[in-house]
Image (cartoon, rainbow, N blue to C red):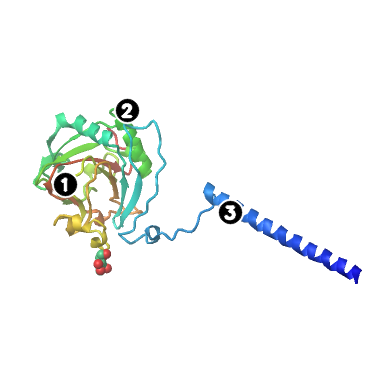
């Protein structure tokens, strides 16, 4: 009896020490998991509706882009990317430029502004046009340290080397000024001699615009009224998928599809400014190296 008692008490000791061991291991495991979560090695599945529906125009992917220091001018605010359309392929990179960089570009261009022209598809020369009523000027590619830093940033954004880009164009639209919908690609042989076809455009907004001045894609596929800023758009802006100008934001869209065919859904225009002033800067990028 006494022997049996001793035996059973020893076995309950063993049972309780097994229990303690299991408990300790569970604790250790949860500690390790917590550490991994904290260090970002593990991540919880995102139930974030923002990330889930790539083809939904209202979907917004908000990912912070790592900051590179010692690059450009001034402090850039929270940088994040938004897919706004797949047809055409179009993205908005928020706070691509700092406020200082926007003002720097405007100040560089201001003394040289001339009435904007369009390219004549027969002669390849610039000509006056009613479809484009802004004023503008071209900067030289790699003109100075700040321009080079912006151009390198554009190359990082598009994955296309700086050497494929034309010089930055700075544009100014006053109240009533606009750019009718057009394609950035060329339909003639003359304009594709240098650098081949234009493949992509990066349009940077250098100022906010109180009303109007949207970039509109009238041929975009998808539900154009599902953008969160729909109610803020002008009548012209509601004629397609629209992006509202915001100082520092950059709009990237592709004029060619991934198979290099022309993409007619890249048709775009600048809506008339209704109130305020619009400053923007355009970088046209070619398939091949563009000689300047
Ligand atoms: C388009 O989006 C708006 C706003 O989200 C919605 O009210 C409307 O029903 C959608 N239209 C279609 C055809 O899906």
Earlier in the chain: of badge 2 and badge 1, it is: 2
The secondary structure type at the circle numbered 2 is helix
Q: In this view, does 252 lie to the left or right of 36?
A: left
Earlier in the chain: of badge 2 and badge 3, it is: 3
Which residue corresponds to mark 2? 145
Residue 227 spot, x, y in % from top left: 26, 58
Give residue 277's mark. Answer: none
Q: Is residue 155 visible?
A: yes
Residue 1 spot, x, y in % from top left: 90, 72
From the Cβ of disc 3, is ligand 1 less than 8 Å away? Answer: no
Residue 66 versus residue 187: which sits nearer the camera? 66
- Cβ–Cβ under 8 Å for marks 3 and 1: no
The secondary structure type at the circle numbered 1 is loop
Residue 181 spot, x, y in % from top left: 17, 52
Which residue corresponds to mark 3? 33
Q: Who's the residue at 39% across and 58% down the image?
A: 51
Q: Distance of mark 2 from mark 3, alpha carbons?
A: 47 Å
- Cβ–Cβ under 8 Å for marks 2 and 1: no
Q: In this view, does 133 lie to the left or right of 105?
A: left
Which residue corresponds to mark 1? 210
User: Within the displayed image, which quadrant is ligand 1 positioned in?
Assistant: bottom left
- Circle 3 Cα neighbour tier, 10 Å, few/some/many (<14 / 14–19 / ≥20): some
Residue 48 spot, x, y in % from top left: 41, 59
Earlier in the chain: of badge 3 and badge 1, it is: 3
Q: Who's the residue at 43% across and 61% down the image?
A: 47
Give the foreground label among 2 and 3: 3
Q: Is residue 273 above or below residue 101?
A: below
Give the foreground label among 2 and 1: 1
Looking at the image, which residue sits at the far bottom? 1
């Amino acid at each position: 009896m006494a022997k049996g008692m001793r035996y059973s008490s020893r076995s309950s000791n063993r049972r309780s020490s097994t229990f303690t061991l299991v408990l300790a291991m569970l604790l250790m495991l949860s500690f390790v998991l917590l550490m991994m979560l904290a260090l970002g090695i593990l991540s919880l599945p995102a139930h974030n509706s923002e990330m889930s529906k790539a083809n939904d125009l209202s979907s917004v992917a908000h990912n912070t882009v790592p900051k590179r220091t010692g690059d450009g001018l001034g402090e850039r605010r929270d940088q994040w990317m938004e897919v706004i359309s797949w047809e055409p392929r179009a993205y908005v990179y928020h706070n691509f430029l700092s406020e200082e960089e926007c003002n720097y570009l405007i100040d560089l261009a201001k003394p040289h502004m001339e009435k904007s022209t369009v390219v004549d598809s027969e002669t390849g020369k610039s000509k006056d046009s009613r479809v484009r009523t802004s004023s503008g000027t071209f900067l030289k590619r790699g003109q100075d340290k700040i321009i080079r830093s912006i151009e390198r940033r554009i190359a990082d954004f598009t994955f296309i080397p700086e050497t494929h880009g034309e010089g930055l164009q700075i544009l100014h639209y006053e109240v009533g000024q606009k750019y009718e919908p057009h394609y950035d690609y060329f339909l003639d042989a003359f304009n594709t001699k240098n650098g081949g076809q234009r493949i992509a455009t990066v349009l940077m907004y250098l100022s906010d615009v109180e009303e109007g001045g949207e970039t509109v894609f009238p041929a975009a596929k998808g539900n154009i009224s599902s953008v969160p800023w729909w109610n803020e758009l002008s009548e012209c802006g509601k004629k397609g998928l629209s992006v509202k100008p915001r100082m520092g934001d950059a709009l990237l869209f592709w004029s060619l599809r991934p198979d290099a065919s022309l993409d007619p859904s890249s048709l775009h225009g600048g809506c008339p400014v209704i109130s305020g002033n619009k400053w923007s800067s355009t970088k046209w990028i070619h398939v091949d190296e563009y000689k300047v």
